[in-house]
């Protein structure tokens, strides 16, 4: 998933970054900890008084909130308008689509008919293909990502630093550069027929450095005491990982789930390289083929219909998982 | 060897056994991922480094040993030079812009306001569609007779635009002066939500007491932000900037979808990855493409190291 | 441990890429089967009816209608050659990149499309199987092919592809606004002048700021890219300079705009939406205009310019077989059918494509296009490295139009440099 500027990929190269806040605060202020796991030293003065700090500057705060609301609503509108416009356009005729009419005149589902009938293979098949690959890639990323993330975060082994650097370096290699070698490899081991084509895509996408990085960051924030407690109880590394650490990492796992599913679902590149049978096409392939219906130019309404088709499943997924996901990225993104 | 250390050999021994077990566990857990990374990723860059020294026929392999000539030719090629300038221009503008946008949104959403979850979701929304879908929408909106130009006409903003040299049917994405900026704005829009979420996390790591103390000291909102919040966000800045730069230097999808494989209009959307792609698949000069790939890798790696120095190398400041 | 991984993977990749082929670039293997299927002796005649097996067909598909037309041709093929089974592989998106990847892995489809645009490169790199042997042994008659289509797919006297259809650039006019299509360039200019400022029109003509149409105008006005034997650039001769400036002046005088300036995806769309009255396109325009039933239009031959003779440019694509294709005999059987009179008729009769042979009936509405094939010069694939020349010209020209400086000088310079570089790298 390296098409659009990516969500959490890459990042720092120091495995054991200092906890945020300690390096930048003055001695007069509190030294912040790592969020929920942090212990804060409280100034004696504030501990004693605990005042209501809203007394000073109350009106300015109210104004700030009003301005904030204004910007928020304006910006939210900006987020939605293009997509709303896409949906509306998909119900218009070609002539109407270039006009600024909010209600289609006339309102027609012809574009949808055209899009659904002319997509090859049919839309259900493509949804299925996309789904199968996306699920598989998500599962492998969660499993392998948590293995590696935990190991890099909590286990000590020689060369850990260099290996993690290598992992991050994989983000610096564009897909286009590896296109031919990877195609050659899978071709030479015979993974170019039938279902093996999809397997080869899953293998290529099986683990992304961003998953490893994300989970590693999250594991770093889990207090060591929990691990030590498990160790004292006689648990080995594997049991500790499986029974103690993994359950605690659910926000990060949710984050990886959403990111990988979304990225794979929208991903065009590797299916383009590795799939030959049209019956195995994923949604982006079918939609690109439809879009590039060469020389027939920009037939906006059906084009917009296909955009909606491509986006709706992720939208649904996103609305369900939004809570976990946002907390997940938040929890693992920037803590030390 | 002192008497003390001799007295506890079993502890030392068991510690070493424990260490070895831990190391083995570590290697075991990273084995499969590392294998995949090495074969599918690291292997390619090494392979590319090798190929870059040859004139290489894609089908039959090495044709002629060229040594560093592919690198020299690339560096001398005006199209490569444009690719470098375009890519760097894009990264240098887009990364701070999106960071600022993301930070701005995060600070606002961080206040206790109603509908916070909704807004948070809404701002991330553009990032979930595929780049092809977003590019299609953007082309539609930025068409000379499309949504953006029509709306600004209706809002009476056209005189303002004329002042800076843009007529009422300015072809934003087809005019080579503005095409790259059009992509910067597009990508800032789509990624601002992601960066906002990273900053939100970093903001939430700052304990309330810090703000309380600042308020007691009489600091206003802007002062608090500038002198306390912003510096405390340094790990956040680092993460976001690094992520952004790595991604930005590899711009490809939107450049191809909005322009074409040639970096149209007039080479203004030629990026380094696009140059690589062209060298390999259009001009069939695989060695040259490999050289471009290696150069790109070095640029990204170098940029990441520089950022690490910038963000992590500074001494702590007193507020 | 890591070193071992690296060496192993490195070696794997190296092997994967390096194995296969002769180790020399640009030395295509002549004749021979090299794959599965009934081996035929080199000296004996080739009888297509005796071949059986499978063929994979690599293709792009520009429209659902095109898919239907191809299917019709393939169905007819199956009737005539029941022992050969064809499997289609449609490639979405960037066909060229996907095919090059397959060549790199020595894994091309048995039969595939080759666009004129990259035919010279594919031939030089040794990706394609020579067809001379098959042509000779079967006695396949290639004379009905329009020579300027076929020559694109020949290199050093060897034939590597047979054109599957062909298109020429013609003028398309909105008959309501241009009831009498101009026959000379001067007439074209005055007709366009008359249409300037007409209500409803954004511009009189839609023009491409690039050689992909500009080349036709360049030829018409007596200019040229290369000298007579194709060894040096001729873009900087006096005639060429005048021709390019003349084309530039069409933009300068507001007689033509680019499709992006008009807000359209391409000039055909501009014509269909009524943004312009004149466009220059090929046979593909006909199918596209079906989406704009309100516009009445017709093809007309390219106007003659100062060169005095009718000239236009063609675009074509061919079928080809890969050097590493596994079923070459079977692929040839399919190719000789699809490019033979029967198969091509099936392919083109629906009007989705225009025949590249003179012995195939011209589908209704394409008479002008086929007439153009008599005097069309290749619009691409006539010199190695043409894509770079195309890009150099286009980038420079577009800059002039965007900046409204309309000076052909920089365009000439950039193109000359590109041509010289392209010729030198051979």
Image (spheres, grey):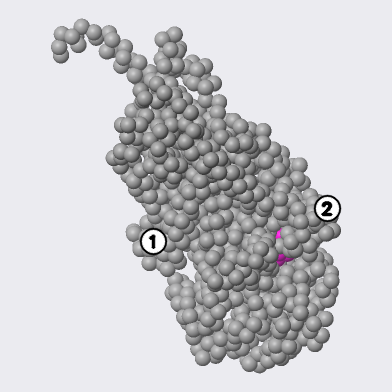
- Give x and y (percent) for residue C293: 84, 69
Question: Mark 2: which secondary structure?
Answer: loop
Left or right, C170 with respect to C233, comes to right
Residue C133 in view (yes/no): no
- Give x and y (percent) for residue A291: 69, 57
* Magenta-drawn segment: A293-297
In this rendering, the answer to whether A251 lies above or below B274 is: above
Q: Which residue is mark 2?
A: A109
B231 within the magenta span = no
Residue A78 in view (yes/no): yes
* Label number found at residue C108: none
Q: Residues within 10 Å of mark 1 (few under 14, many from 20)?
A: many
Left or right, B40 with respect to C350, comes to left
A295 within the magenta span = yes
Left or right, B303 with respect to C240, comes to left
Q: Which residue is mark 1?
A: B70
Q: Chain of mark 2?
A: A
Q: What residue is shown at x 24% (from left), y 9% (from top)?
A: B9
């Amino acid at each position: 998933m390296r098409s659009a500027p990516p969500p959490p990929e890459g990042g720092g190269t120091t495995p054991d970054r200092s906890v945020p806040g300690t390096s930048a605060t003055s001695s007069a202020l509190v030294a912040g900890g790592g969020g929920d796991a942090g212990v804060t030293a409280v100034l004696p003065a504030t501990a004693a008084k605990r005042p209501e700090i809203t007394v000073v500057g109350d009106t300015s705060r109210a104004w700030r909130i009003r301005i904030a609301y204004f910007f928020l609503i304006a910006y939210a509108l900006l987020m939605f308008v293009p997509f709303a416009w896409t949906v509306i356009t998909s119900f218009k005729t070609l002539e109407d689509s270039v006009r600024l009419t909010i209600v289609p005149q006339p309102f027609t589902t012809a574009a949808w008919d055209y899009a659904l009938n002319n997509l090859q293979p049919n839309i259900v098949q493509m949804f299925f293909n996309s789904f199968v690959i996306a699920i598989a890639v998500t599962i492998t990323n969660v499993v392998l990502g948590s293995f590696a993330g935990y190991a890099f975060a909590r286990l000590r082994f020689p060369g850990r630093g260099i290996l993690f650097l290598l992992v991050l370096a994989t983000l610096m290699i564009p897909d286009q550069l590896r296109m031919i070698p990877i195609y050659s490899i899978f071709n030479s081991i015979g993974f170019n027929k039938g279902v093996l084509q999809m397997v080869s895509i899953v293998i290529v996408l099986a683990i992304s450095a961003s998953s490893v990085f994300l989970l590693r960051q999250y594991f770093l924030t889990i207090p060591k005491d929990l691990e030590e407690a498990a160790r004292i109880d006689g648990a080995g590394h594997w049991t500790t990982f499986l029974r103690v650490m993994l359950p605690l990492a659910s926000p990060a796992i949710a984050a990886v789930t959403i990111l990988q599913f979304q990225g794979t679902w929208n991903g065009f590149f590797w299916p383009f390289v590795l799939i030959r049978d049209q019956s195995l096409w994923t949604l982006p392939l079918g939609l690109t083929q439809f879009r590039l219906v060469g020389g027939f130019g920009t037939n906006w309404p059906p084009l917009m219909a296909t955009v909606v088709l491509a986006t709706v499943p992720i939208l649904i997924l996103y609305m369900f998982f939004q809570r976990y996901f946002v907390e997940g990225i938040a929890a693992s993104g920037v803590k030390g | 060897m002192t008497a003390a250390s001799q007295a506890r050999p079993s502890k030392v021994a068991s510690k070493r056994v424990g260490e070895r077990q831990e190391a083995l566990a570590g290697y075991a857990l990273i084995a499969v991922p590392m294998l995949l990374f090495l074969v599918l990723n690291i292997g390619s860059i090494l392979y590319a480094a090798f190929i870059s020294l040859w004139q290489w026929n894609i089908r039959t392999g090495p044709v002629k040993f060229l040594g560093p000539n592919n690198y020299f030719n690339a560096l001398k090629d005006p199209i490569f030079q444009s690719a470098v300038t375009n890519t760097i221009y894009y990264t240098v503008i887009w990364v701070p812009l999106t960071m600022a946008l993301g930070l701005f949104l995060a600070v606002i959403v961080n206040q206790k306001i109603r509908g916070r979850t909704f807004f948070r979701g809404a701002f991330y929304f553009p990032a979930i569609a595929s780049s092809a879908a977003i590019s299609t929408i953007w082309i539609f909106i930025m068409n000379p007779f499309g949504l953006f130009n029509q709306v600004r006409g209706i809002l009476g903003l056209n005189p303002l635009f004329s002042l800076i040299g843009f007529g009422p049917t300015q072809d934003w994405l087809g005019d080579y002066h503005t095409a790259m900026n059009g992509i910067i704005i597009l990508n800032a829009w789509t990624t601002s939500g992601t960066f906002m979420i990273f900053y939100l996390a970093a903001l939430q790591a700052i304990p309330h007491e810090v703000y309380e103390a600042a308020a007691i000291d009489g600091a206003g909102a802007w002062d608090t932000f500038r002198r306390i919040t912003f510096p405390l966000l340094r790990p956040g800045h680092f993460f976001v900037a690094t992520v952004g730069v790595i991604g930005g230097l590899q711009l490809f999808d939107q450049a191809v979808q909005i322009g074409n494989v040639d970096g149209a209009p007039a080479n203004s959307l030629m990026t380094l990855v696009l140059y690589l792609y062209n060298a390999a698949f259009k001009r069939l000069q695989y060695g040259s493409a490999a050289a471009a790939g290696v150069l790109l890798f070095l640029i990204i790696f170098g940029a990441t190291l520089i950022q690490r120095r910038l963000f992590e190398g500074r001494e702590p400041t007193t507020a | 441990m890591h070193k071992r991984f690296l060496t192993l993977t490195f070696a794997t990749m190296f092997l994967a890429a390096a194995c296969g082929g002769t180790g020399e670039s640009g030395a295509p293997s002549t004749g021979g089967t090299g794959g599965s299927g009934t081996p035929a002796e080199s000296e004996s005649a080739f009888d297509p009816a005796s071949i059986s097996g499978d063929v994979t067909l690599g293709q792009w598909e520009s429209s659902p209608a095109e898919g239907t037309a191809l299917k019709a041709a393939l169905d007819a093929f199956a009737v005539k050659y029941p022992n050969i089974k064809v499997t289609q592989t449609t490639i979405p998106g960037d066909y060229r990149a996907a095919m090059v990847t397959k060549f790199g892995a020595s894994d091309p489809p048995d039969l595939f499309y080759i666009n004129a645009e990259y035919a010279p490169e594919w031939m030089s790199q040794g990706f394609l199987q020579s067809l001379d042997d098959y042509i000779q042994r079967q006695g396949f008659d290639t004379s009905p092919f329009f020579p300027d289509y076929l020559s694109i797919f020949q290199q050093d006297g060897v034939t590597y592809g047979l054109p599957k259809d062909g298109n020429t650039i013609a003028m398309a006019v909105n008959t309501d606004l241009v009831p009498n299509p101009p026959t000379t360039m001067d007439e074209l200019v005055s007709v366009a002048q008359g249409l300037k400022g007409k209500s409803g029109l954004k511009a009189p003509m839609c023009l491409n700021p690039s050689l992909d149409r500009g080349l036709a105008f360049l030829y018409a006005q007596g200019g040229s890219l290369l000298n007579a034997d194709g060894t040096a650039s001729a873009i900087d001769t006096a005639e060429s300079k005048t021709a390019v400036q003349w084309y530039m002046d069409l933009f300068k005088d507001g007689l033509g705009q680019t499709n992006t300036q008009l807000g359209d995806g391409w000039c055909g769309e501009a014509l269909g939406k009524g943004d312009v009255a004149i466009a220059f396109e090929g046979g593909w325009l006909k199918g596209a205009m079906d989406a704009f039933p309100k516009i009445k239009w017709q093809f007309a031959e390219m106007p003659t310019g100062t060169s005095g003779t009718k000239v236009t440019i063609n675009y074509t694509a061919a079928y080809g077989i890969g050097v590493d294709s596994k079923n070459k005999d079977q692929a040839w059987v399919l190719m000789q059918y699809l490019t033979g009179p029967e198969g091509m008729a099936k392919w083109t009769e629906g009007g989705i494509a225009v025949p590249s042979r003179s012995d195939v009936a011209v589908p209704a509405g394409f008479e002008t296009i086929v007439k153009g094939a008599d005097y069309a010069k290749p619009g691409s694939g006539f010199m190695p490295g043409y894509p770079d020349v195309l890009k150099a010209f286009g980038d420079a020209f577009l800059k002039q139009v965007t900046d409204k400086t309309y000076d052909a000088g920089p365009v000439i310079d950039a193109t000359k440099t590109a041509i010289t570089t392209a010729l030198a790298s051979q």
